[in-house]
Amino acid sequence: MAKDFPTREENYTQWYNDLVIKADLAENSAVRGCMVIKPYGYAIWEKMQSTLDKMFKDTGHVNAYFPLFIPKSFFSREADHVEGFAKECAVVTHYRLKNSPDGKGVVVDEDAKLEEELIIRPTSETIIWDTYKNWIQSYRDLPLLVNQWANVVRWEMRTRLFLRTTEFLWQEGHTAHATKEEAIEETKIILNIYADFAEKWMALPVLKGSKSPNERFAGAVETYCIESLMQDGKALQVGTSHFLGQNFAKAFDVKFLSKENKLEYVWATSWGVSTRLMGALIMAHSDDNGLVLPPKLAPIQVVIVPIYKKEEQLNQISEVAQKIKKSLTDKGITVKYDDRDTFKPGWKFSEYEFKGVPVRLAIGPRDLENNTVEVARRDTLEKEVLQVTDIENKIEHLLEQIQNNLYQKALSFREDNTYAVDTWEEFKDIIENKGGFVLAHWDGTSETEEKIKNETKTTIRTIPLDNKPEKGRCIYTGKPSKQRVVFAKAY
Amino acid sequence: MAKDFPTREENYTQWYNDLVIKADLAENSAVRGCMVIKPYGYAIWEKMQSTLDKMFKDTGHVNAYFPLFIPKSFFSREADHVEGFAKECAVVTHYRLKNSPDGKGVVVDEDAKLEEELIIRPTSETIIWDTYKNWIQSYRDLPLLVNQWANVVRWEMRTRLFLRTTEFLWQEGHTAHATKEEAIEETKIILNIYADFAEKWMALPVLKGSKSPNERFAGAVETYCIESLMQDGKALQVGTSHFLGQNFAKAFDVKFLSKENKLEYVWATSWGVSTRLMGALIMAHSDDNGLVLPPKLAPIQVVIVPIYKKEEQLNQISEVAQKIKKSLTDKGITVKYDDRDTFKPGWKFSEYEFKGVPVRLAIGPRDLENNTVEVARRDTLEKEVLQVTDIENKIEHLLEQIQNNLYQKALSFREDNTYAVDTWEEFKDIIENKGGFVLAHWDGTSETEEKIKNETKTTIRTIPLDNKPEKGRCIYTGKPSKQRVVFAKAY
């Protein structure tokens, strides 16, 4: 465990990269752009997965699994989709290796060339809608509410652990509906699930909104998203939920016989969140002392460290510690009792602090005498000495407090870094010198959006769903506008 | 739902293929050899996953995730491994597509050729041991008990849903140890987990044993396995656990400083089960009426079907059904109440029978009067009328009975189809005309094993761990032998 990494102030980018690696969350692999998710990081991802999976199932969704490979020709079927996705991707061209002539290794067997190349899925709309064609005949087969947990590959030139990697893990929902209204309703149900998950589990406040046409998913009619603000004032898109209209149904000829006995194209949605959530979680709460994790997603919620000199003391402390551990475990709290004799208490303290364990309990000889325990919380770094009596309820309450505190802190940060701006000078000034979310009027055209992006590297992150109508003039062109939209630099 | 499929007697292969497709478990995809796992099939796989995952974690293992891609050169590092794995596999050679000159599609961009080709993992020993090199320095870093749930690809020429597919899902454990003894102990811990899972959850009796050198995993010093017998008399390898010695540590130069301050190579194991388990589960218990699922892995354990003519009757029945559903759900039993008015009760009966739902409850007007319910069990197809009183305990007991019955039935089948054989004539006769497990003496040489395989398509499935020593003469060469081994034709 090492604290020799820059503060956020010194170098935010390096702070993040070092944190991910030194806190044992993930690391770069031998394959360019692909990461190894280490056990501690993967345990957080598993908590995210199981929580989201339950939320999907509670709203009637089921899981399935579709092929990793997509025939190249499938991408050309949907015109916008091919522009967006069938470019930077991994292409399988051969299916066999053979011993090299020099006997020293293996080479590609040119006789084993595929007739049609296979693309590693960057997203699965095409292969799934090709499959749905056979699953859907009548309105009775609808809605189809399917989700998949899978790996996908997008050949990224610049990668960063969790935030942008060539291979990443995600879930992708693909639903089919009889009506447009029902499909739009579905995208909103999912958007709300994503927002709930971000706010209640990740302690991450998010804006719910739609994307401008420039930022839409390739093939979507409307893209809804949740957007959050990181500590460096940059926005991070946390999740997206797309209304695909009948685009994929038309591309793959998926029709159904309606109740009125008419043959109609099916309406579609797709939606996803990925291991990028890990990046958001890390960046949102962590500090210069290391990782800070919200209790609901922490693999270890409470760690107990014994402080002793003699073996005999350890035995007495262990007895108390095990009792406390049991009373917490019975409450559903995840506890680790670290009685390893290969490390000193001070080393352990800083290790668990660095790894973001929300609550640390320390028990020493004096605590035994007084029936107390020292309680340290990771979010504020405050310590207090508590009576052991009723400790399980005190800790349960403390964990809730920490969860709420992290959310409130992140919310205050966002509020403090959200600016309503009315002049172009002010806009540029804030973007350049402060960062954050900038609420400004926009004339609604892609051209203006593009120009603002070129001049300031800022994009429209979202058009909030709960926007109140407000007449104004576009920050850039001065043309009339009906509402403010959210601009920011983004990950 | 359709029963128009052959009986096992008529055409076992076709019976299996039809069953998988018609029971909505899986289907072939647009990509040759790759399957789509449908929601009903995937729900069974999820139950398998969560059960195994808990068993792994209870024995100290943690999950992680390693890249999908493996640099080609990695395979050449371990001599045996390259022979076994780096041949029939998917090879990524390019990372970009571009619009085709005719504007009608996309083509591979020849400018985006990878310097070194990437192989889609057929198994991950190489990339993982390359990673472990940085994780392991001292004995304090050991043991490393890591598992991964992932997709893998092996380019198979002949594929069958679940049993052999180009892409499949699996878990692969990769552990690192300070001593040989500890590594061997680990392979046995896992073998016992696999056997427990097969017997207690899948209701599938298995033989635990080791493989002959010919059948060993490429790169292993010893391969342990569990083997089961299917209804057509063919063996199916359910899971394997490999002791890898120091082969991969040497290939990837993974050394650790021992307690005695010596630099030593690390000892390794790897072990896995895959979606092939689904094939075993389906083939082991199902019958000519469709799927038969052991209650512990059935996505729906109990289905309730109302039988009514008038809307008013349905309301009354629904009230009772919902009460029963709740009392069962409270016991942790998964219940579906199917009150759809788009299908008739008879249709529903045969649908759930076909899909292997262990228990079906039917409630009609007469049942309302008598406070009864008709209970049908899928395994024996028996029906009885029970009083509703205390129904949750009766059903819970019945589910246990069904689970046990399926196991006992499969065990009896295996016992009835296991033959101790002492002459070559008898051996050939049984293999040709009866199938099953044949216990016979073998001289211990690969040559003899090879000859027997060539003449009879039979392989040594396993050398049982609990084998009693018994002197005899090799069934083929007449040379001395110390024990019987298990021969069979295999999937």
Image (cartoon, coloured by chain):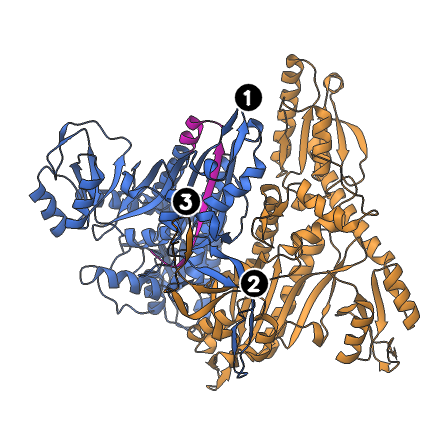
Chain colours: A orange, B blue
Q: Are marks 3 and 2 in contact (CB under 8 Å)?
A: no
Position of residue A327 measured from the top left corner of the image (x, y, whole percent): 63, 31
Chain part drawn in magenta? B164-186
Q: Which quadrant of the view contains residue A181? A: bottom right
For discs 1 and 2, the disc positioned in front in the rendered view = 1
Residue holding disc 1: B259
The one of A46 and B427 positioned closer to us in this rendering: B427
* Callout 1: chain: B
Q: Is residue A306 above or below residue B465?
A: above
Q: Residues within 10 Å of mark 3 (few under 14, many from 20)?
A: many
* Callout 3: chain: B
The one of B163 and B285 positioned closer to us in this rendering: B163
* Callout 2: chain: A
Viewport quadrant of the C terminus of chain A: bottom right
Residue under the point 73% across and 34% down: A394
The one of B397 and A475 positioned closer to us in this rendering: A475
Residue under the point 73% across and 62% down: A227
Amino acid type of the residue tagged 1 in the rendering: Lys
Spatial separation of the CA atoms under disc 3 and disc 1:
31 Å
Seen in the image, is A234 located left or right of residue B452? right
Q: Secondary structure at mark 1?
A: loop
Q: Which quadrant of the view contains residue B270? A: top left
Amino acid type of the residue tagged 3 in the rendering: Gly
Position of residue B317 measured from the top left corner of the image (x, y, whole percent): 44, 63
Q: Which quadrant of the view contains residue A206? A: bottom right
Image disc number at residue B272? 3
Spatial separation of the CA atoms under disc 1 and disc 2:
48 Å
Q: Secondary structure at mark 2?
A: strand
Residue B179 lies within the magenta run: yes
Q: Earlier in the sequence, mark 3 or mark 1?
A: 1
